[in-house]
Structure formats: C-alpha cells, structure tokens
Amino acid sequence: MKQAELTGLLCVIWAVTLLYGEMVAFWRPSLGSCSWPHQSNNASSSMADRDYVKVAVLTDPQLMDRTSLPLPPKSLALELAQFFADLFMRRAFHQSVLPLQPDVIFFLGDYFDGGPYLSDEEWKESLSRLKHIFSLSAPERYSNIPVYYLSGNHDIGYGILHSRRAEAIKRYEKEFGSRNYRFAVGKVEFIAIDAQTIDGNPQGILTSSTHDFIKNVSMDVQAYPRVLLTHIPLYRQDWTDCGPNRNSEIVNQRIVRSADGQEVVYQNYITEESSKYLLDSIQPVLVLSGHDHDQCHVIHESKYGPVGEYTVGTVSWQQGNLYPSFMLVSTSNFVPSTASDAEEAILTQPCFLPMQTHIYIWYLSLFALTLLALLLWPSSGVSVGHHFSDLMGLGKQLISSIKSRTKEKNEDLNCEYEMIWDAEGSMHLVKKALSTPIARTSEKNLAERGTAVMRPTARKNSSQEIEVTVNADTDTDAMAKLLPRASRSWTKRVIKRLVRTFRMVIIIAAVNVPLYVMLLFKDWIDK
C-alpha cells in the first residue's frame, strides 16, 4: 500500500469514527436498543399504544458553572467543559429522547450545579443554557409535550440555606412553578414534593407547607394509582443492593445537621421516619427519584405492602457517572380493575446513553495509531523487506569491522618484536612469539648495541615496518568513518519521515476537522 492509499484509508477511518461518536451513537435508543416498556413487556403485548401515555424522565443535568471546577470564571477551560457537557445533553435529548416521541417529560431536579450560590445574572445565564439544551425556550416546537419540574438541592439548597438565601427559592418558583404539586398523566396520579424541606425544622414555613401538602393528599380519595416524585431518594439501609443496572459504588446513608440540630446541611437520603410517613400518607405504587446520579432499584416496605423505587441516573456525562441514562415510563390510560391490570398500570424501562468518556478515549487511541502508522509505514516504492535488509547489511559491516580489529589486537598481544643486526650494521625488526624464550646473549648484544646510531638504511627499513603497522589499522579508520556516515544517513531519514508524517497529518486533519466542527455546530445551533 502506498502512502497516498494509507492516508486515504486513515481519512475514511477518522470520518466514520467521528460520524459514529458525534451522531450515530445517540441514535441507538431510538433505533431499538431502548423501547417503551408497554411495547416490550410480554404481559402487555396485547395492549395498544392508545392504552398508555409515554413519559420520559430525566434528572440531574447540573449545568456546570463557576462552582463546578477549580477554574477561573469565564476561563477557556471552564467554557470548553461547559460546552461539551451541554452539547452531550442536547444531543441526548434531541437524538435519543425526542425520536421516541414521548407524550410527557419529567425533570426530577438539579438543573444547575451552584444554583443557590449564583448571582441573578449568572443564574439567568445558566437558565438560558438549560432552555437551549432542552429546547425549553421554544415551547411552540413541542407544544403537545407537557413538561413537569421538580426542585433539587442544587436548585434551592438544603434547609440551612432557605432562610439565608430566600431569593433562590423565589426565582426558582417564578421560573419552574410550585415545589409541591400534583397532576395526572393518563389514569395515574403523580405527587411531586420538595424533598429538601421535608426533614427541615418542623416550625419552619417551608417544611410546614410541605407537610401540609402531604396531609391534604392523604385525605383525598385515591381514584388512580399514585407515583411519588422526589429528588432525594427514600431511606434505604447501608449497602442495600441497587440491582444490575448500577455501575458505581453504593452510597450509604449520611445526613448532616446544623449546630442546633434543626436544619439539614446535607443528606443522601430522606430520613427513615420521613420515608415511612411519605409511603403511608401518599400510598404510592411507585417512587421515582434522582440525586444519586446512578441507577438504583429498591423495594420499600409500607403498611400497605411493598413499594418499588427507581432512582434515575444523571443525564450528564460529567457528573461522576460514565453511563448517563434516562428512563421511560408507560402509564395506563385505563383504571385497573384487577390485580394483573394494576401491575401493568405503570411500567418502567431504563435507557442508557453513549459513554462519552469512552468515545474520547477512542479518539486519543486512534490519533496515536495514526501517528505510528504514518511514521513506520515504508516510503513509496520501497518495501518493508528492503528497509530490513538495509539494516541487516549495516549491522554486518559493523560487526565484521569490530571482529577484524579485535583479531589483530589479539595477535599483537601474543608476540614481541626483536632487533636483529646484520653484518653490514643494519637493524631488522622480527616478530617473535611470547612463548619463545629470549636468549640471554641476544639481550647482551642488544644492550651492547643500545648506544649505536641508526644508519639511513635502518631508517628506511623501520619506516617500511611502520607503514605495515599503519596499513593494519586501516580497517579501524574505515569503521570510524562508517559510524558517522551511518548516523548522518539515519538522521536524514528520520527528518524526512517526520516531515512526511506531518504532511500526511495535515491532509487528514484538513478533511476531518471541518467535518468534526460541522457535527458540533449542527447539533448546537437551533434548527
């Protein structure tokens, strides 16, 4: 495969990857991986769509703001984090939820991250983002889809903040309506309560109003099955199993109160006493909650029998859950007359969204693989075997040069040179092995002649011997020259390979970066 073909293949791989990660992955729920429970439940297969109202339940978007991360407000890093978190939820809503054609939409609270602590200007900015993500600023587009809201602790705070930041509750109610209310969907009644006040100071106005609302509900005749909506889940014992759909560790009961013990500073679950009070007063057949950011299905015991609770996971991928989700609820359009009909009156189905973190990890992995492929792929017209043979040849040359030099050095170590004088007075150097003993007479003669002056003939012969020695070192010089040449050659090849890789990366980026930007703004801009 040539370089141009490899570059083209990588361009296609990147384009397919971006199309899947930025668009197709969000189609999975609406393409069949998740369906309305009354359509998939065997017991209700005979029921038609007209017998049920389709409800989509979302919770804990917790739009990021200056309180979310230790970053300066309006910094580029914070703006990017906000943008990609918002974009994921907008895609999830428009490509996963709305294509399922829900009749009603529930939001179970925590729309903002630092809601009570935001100034009015910051709160309005976050509200504008929320409306844009879920198209709440254009109600005419979904005028046939009623939307119901529930207050969360990140929207109005716990009891300790209610007296200190009363404006947080006022602006919430002005935008989203009452914190405690009831409504009917089909032949099922939903009871929405402000869970942040139920465990507060009994003498407080907000806690008293919540308890008064619950008391009024309990006194009314129950004509339809009831579903309790609470942002904070009901009490559960520590290490209670949450079922197969949970991915994070179990969160145990924790509640923190103020110094006087009257107001709640923080709580994971509603207290055991308040939970029993809610179950016995409202008598729900199902409880839907949020706050935990992960799926959980538990069974509560009440004096009227067991009651199931589904805690819905967060819809955001930046709220500590790698597996964002939402829930589909089918509520009956008929009044159940038998026990079997009562079981089919309210059906639930959790739905999971794409794992955005895994998508970004794959992008980084594909980028690394792309660089490796471009760096290591052979040049056009040259095979991988040719490069390998070049490397082997260079290695053999170096090894042979080192071996020849080592052999000559070993021979020199095993011998010595002896000066021999002929009759004419000329000196000759003769190589003599170390194993041969040196005659004492020779040493004597050598000592006697040690003060003699070397004649021109001797100089000539000596220079010839030196020339022989220099010729013996020729291979060493060749090896010394070979190494710098090889180094220069490899440096040149590396530079050429880097330049070629950079050029190919630019080509791939020129094709796919515009595609990525187009996919980003296609989903972000109002249609």
Image: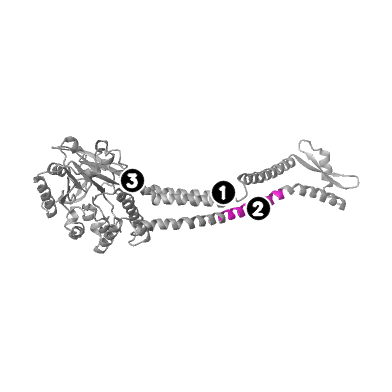
Q: Could you say which is closer to the camera, residue 456 or residue 241?
A: 241
Disc 2 designates what residue?
484
- Crowding near pointer 1: few (<14 within 10 Å), some, many (20+)? some
In the image, 79: left or right of 9? left
Is 194 in the magenta? no
- The residue at 39%/47% (across/down) is 358
| Residue 393 position by quadrant | top right
Disc 3 designates what residue?
29
Q: Could you say which is closer to the camera, residue 421 or residue 389?
A: 389
- The amino acid on which the numbered mark 2 sits, given as a three-letter code, is Pro
Query: Which residues lie in the magenta part?
Result: 476-498
Residue 377's disc is 1
- The amino acid on which the numbered mark 3 sits, given as a three-letter code, is Pro
- Crowding near pointer 3: few (<14 within 10 Å), some, many (20+)? many
- The amino acid on which the numbered mark 1 sits, given as a three-letter code, is Trp
Q: Earlier in the sequence, mark 3 or mark 1?
A: 3
